């Protein structure tokens, strides 16, 4: 009984053709160890440098509590000056995180310090980088990204534990209907298989990101992250060439999210209870049928 987790593949350097054949086309995660070593950020991006460049801008913070059934997706729980937050995570374990921090809006100087890996693939959304900060012990619950991009996720100043699951496992992971996240009542890093039996036998990939590591997460891959140290990351996103993936992205962004926010606003807890019930029903059915095949 348990999850079947395999260590992620790690490459120091890789050619465009090898990356395409071994990881992009088969949609297989990999750690690119040397990519960020070519960036100014590899040496410059310390906690103190972040404080200096970003300054006292007020930032929304997110914690590990279960989502409010009536709140729109990605609603923050608190606010704090960025410099105070960095001091907090440097010295103290906390479950408070900064989510989807926009360096273009808040600290454009940071754009000089990293390079999009266009030597490996095209389709990068250069106007939409995102940064993530977390205190030791903070977690990002299991989810996949709503816009379905390929993600190059580079970590700085510490370690982060990551679990990855192919999109095909969505029902067995207790995916919430009309959402891109899983049921929040279980801990995927230490599951209770008696209470959540559909998790038993799921196959995934595990890794520890360290300073300068770049994790390639293909479109649709589920990911759970836990900060082992106060640290931060930057994600660069790229479109998949498939029109089916692009259509899925637009459906998530334009139709599903608006419908979900409307239903949460109108029916609140009643709607959320129904969604959680359906997630459990779908998971149990998939488990019983041995899905995915």
Image (cartoon, rainbow, N blue to C red):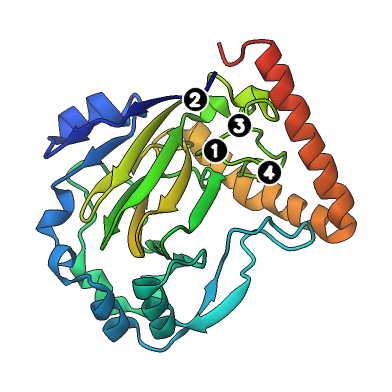
Q: Residues within 10 Å of mark 4 (few under 14, many from 20)?
A: few
- In-image side of 166 versus 91 (left or right): right
- Can you tell which of label 3 and label 2 is closer to the viewer? 2
Where's the N terminus, which quadrant?
A: top right
Q: Position of residue 207 (x, y in %)?
A: 33, 39
Is label 1 in contact with label 3 (beta carbons under 8 Å)? yes
Q: How many marks?
A: 4
Given contact means CB atoms under 8 Å apart, are the residues at marks 4 and 1 in contact?
Answer: no
Whether the residues at callouts 2 and 1 have beta carbons within 8 Å, the answer is yes
Q: Residue at x 39, y 30 (%)?
A: 205
- Vertical side of 175 occupied by 264: above or below: below
Mark 4 falls on what kind of element?
loop
Q: In the drawing, what numbered circle is on residue 173? A: 3
What residue is pinned by disc 1? Answer: 188
Quote the CA–CA distance across marks 2 and 1.
9 Å
- Which numbered marker is on residue 3? 2
Q: Residues within 10 Å of mark 2 (few under 14, many from 20)?
A: some
Q: Position of residue 148 (x, y in %)?
A: 49, 43
Quadrant position of residue 20: top left
Q: Which residue is mark 4?
A: 185
Give the Cα distance between marks 1 and 3.
9 Å
């Amino acid at each position: 009984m348990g999850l079947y987790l395999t260590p992620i593949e790690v490459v120091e350097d890789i050619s465009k053709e090898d990356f395409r054949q071994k990881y992009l086309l088969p949609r297989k995660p990999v750690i690119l160890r040397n990519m960020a070593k070519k960036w100014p950020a590899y040496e410059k991006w310390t906690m103190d440098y972040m404080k200096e460049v970003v300054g006292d801008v007020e930032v929304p913070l997110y914690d590990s509590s279960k989502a409010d059934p009536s709140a729109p997706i990605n609603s923050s729980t608190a606010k704090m000056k960025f410099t105070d937050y960095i001091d907090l995570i440097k010295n103290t374990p906390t479950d408070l995180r900064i989510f989807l921090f926009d360096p273009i809006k808040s600290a454009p100087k940071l754009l000089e310090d990293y390079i999009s890996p266009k030597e490996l693939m095209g389709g990068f959304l250069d106007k939409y980088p995102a940064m993530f900060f977390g205190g030791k012990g903070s977690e990002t619950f299991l989810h996949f990204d709503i816009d379905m991009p390929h993600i190059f996720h580079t970590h700085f100043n510490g370690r982060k534990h990551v679990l990855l699951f192919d999109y095909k496992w969505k029902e067995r992971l207790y995916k919430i209907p009309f959402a891109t996240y899983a049921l929040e009542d279980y801990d995927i890093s230490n599951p209770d298989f008696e209470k959540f039996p559909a998790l038993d036998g799921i196959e995934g990939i595990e890794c520890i990101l360290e300073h300068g590591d770049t994790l390639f997460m293909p479109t649709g891959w589920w990911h759970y992250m836990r900060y082992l140290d106060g640290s931060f990351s930057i994600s660069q996103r790229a479109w998949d060439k498939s029109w089916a993936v692009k259509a899925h992205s637009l459906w998530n962004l334009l139709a599903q999210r608006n419908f979900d926010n409307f239903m949460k606003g109108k029916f609140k807890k009643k709607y959320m209870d129904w969604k959680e019930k359906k997630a459990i029903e779908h998971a149990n059915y998939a488990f019983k049928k041995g899905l995915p095949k």
